[in-house]
Image (cartoon, grey):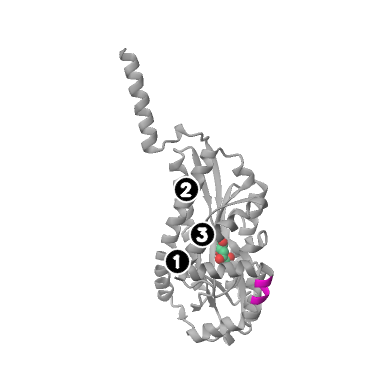
Amino acid sequence: MFKQFKASVLVVAAFTACTLTGAAWAQDIKPRLIRFGYGLNDDSVQGRAARHLAQEVEKLSGGKMKMKTFGSASLGSDEQMQGALVGGAQEMMVGSTAPLAGMVKDFGIFDLPFLFESEKEADAVLDGQLGTRLLGKLEPKGLVGLVYWENGFRNMTNSKKPIVRAEDMQGIKLRVMQNQIALGVFNQLGANAVPMPFSELFTALETRTVDGQENPVTTIQSSKFYEVQPYLTLTRHVYTPWVVMASKKWWDTLTPDEQKVIRQAAANSRDFERKDSRADSTKAMGVLEKEGMKINTPSAEEIARMREKVKPVVDKYTQELGPDLVRELNDEIKKARG
Ligand code: KDG
């Protein structure tokens, strides 16, 4: 009698322990090692979020699933890591939507300039029906799009002169991300746009192979571009998302419980990363000022002139991306703007 009572107490205790702590032993989770690659350095928004994701994966799997993070493009550029995930040679990564546009054209909408005015609008569109649908389009290409992190609003830096008016971009050799829309927009603005992987950018700026680049202030600070770029112009011309992805080949080997762990950890990391990115933006501006960057913000009239100047490129790529898709994006942004 006592033995039965003791056994039932043990079962109840174990079940309670599992329910309360979500311990993995009750779930179908095997020991796994996950390699997660990213392009910025370890002391960046991407690096902190990658480590947060790794902690979440370990916690939610009861220590069974371990993630090793590899920064500074040590596993390759965004484009190279995308290929490694498709081939199943690497499990996970985070990268920009710009290079993804080569696989799923629709991601090019996030390179159209002067769309978003706030992070709130970006969150609403990315986490809403449109952003979710785009993530789903990665699966047939061999990638599982999990969540969006914030790369952020892009600003221009250069080593030649302050960019006060659109005309000041004339002749500036400007590195852009590797996609046709970014290339077209800056050539239309009069710059000499040079597509290049992020991993080669600092050296190209240092050796004056290119005069300038455009990235969020968090990246400008964490990648120390201020060391080789005296001028910063706060254009906020594009909001770039990052996409946290898994290899579909690897994903399909996971049990439903293991997939649930990854999805939940990714969602937790998204909330952490966005908060960190916004706090880091403010901090980064202080650092860039302290490091002596000459910072200017173009007037609203100048931004309007730049918007007008790039209209032919926006019209061209609206046709190529699909007018309905671009209209849907603009409608979602208007809804979020309220
Ligand atoms: O790997 C780093 C890239 O994902 C990211 O920084 C992309 O903004 C980007 C750029 O300029 O390449």
Can you tell me which quadrant of the image ligand 1 is in?
Answer: bottom right
Please report whichever mark, 2 or 3, sits nearer to the chain's N-terminal start: 3
Amino acid under disc 2: Ala
Q: Say which residue label 2 marks.
A: 265
Quadrant where the C terminus is found in the figure: bottom left
* Rendering coords of residue 145 (x, y %): 57, 53
Secondary element under disc 2, as helix, strand or loop, is helix
Residue at (48, 73) in percent of width and height: 117
- Alpha carbons under labels 2 and 3: distance apart: 19 Å
Residue at (47, 47) in percent of width and height: 264
Q: Which residues are magenta?
A: 315-319
Dot 3, how many residues are within 10 Å of its Cα: few (below 14), some (14-19), or many (20+)?
few
Residue at (30, 14) in percent of width and height: 2
Amino acid under disc 3: Gly
Q: Say which residue label 3 marks.
A: 128
Residue 316 within the segment the image draws in magenta: yes
